[in-house]
């Protein structure tokens, strides 16, 4: 896995559970409508971000290796 990840949240799926904030508070934020957003377009890879994606109850978070374009989560 690369050192940089492109993290996206499908806001049409996000239910605003806040699980991502609990796992990676420095990397995600909730807007006024309780929709999750990554704080930056490209983030440093971290266990917290992967945990956030894996713990999202509706799998709204996707992670792509920013260098290779490989889909890291969800698994294909």
Image: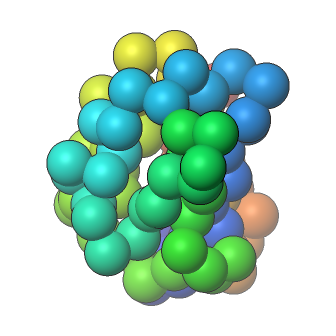
Please give left or right for residue 24 compared with residue 2 in the image.
left
When the figure is inspected, residue 36 is found, relative to residue 54, above or below; the finding is below
Quarter containing the C terminus: top right
Residue 20 in the image: above or below residue 48: above
Q: Residue at position x 54%, y 74% from top?
A: 39
Q: Who's the residue at 30% across and 29% down the image?
A: 55
| Residue 62 visible within the image | no
Residue at 60% from the left image edge and 80% from the top image edge: 40
Residue 31: percent from left, percent from top: 59, 54
Residue at 35% over, 38% down: 18
Where is residue 62? Give x, y as percent: 61, 43
- Left/right of residue 34 with respect to residue 26 in the rendered view: right
Visible residue check, residue 70: yes
- The residue at the far top in this view is 58
The image shows residue 70, relative to residue 15, as above or below, that is: below
* Quadrant of res 19: top left
């Amino acid at each position: 896995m690369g050192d940089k990840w492109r993290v996206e949240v499908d806001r049409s799926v996000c239910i605003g559970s806040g699980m991502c904030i609990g796992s990676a508070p420095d990397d995600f934020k909730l807007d006024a409508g309780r929709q999750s957003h990554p704080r930056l377009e490209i983030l440093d890879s971290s266990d917290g971000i992967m945990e956030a994606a894996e713990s999202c109850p509706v799998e709204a978070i996707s992670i792509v290796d920013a260098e290779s374009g490989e889909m890291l989560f969800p698994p294909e």
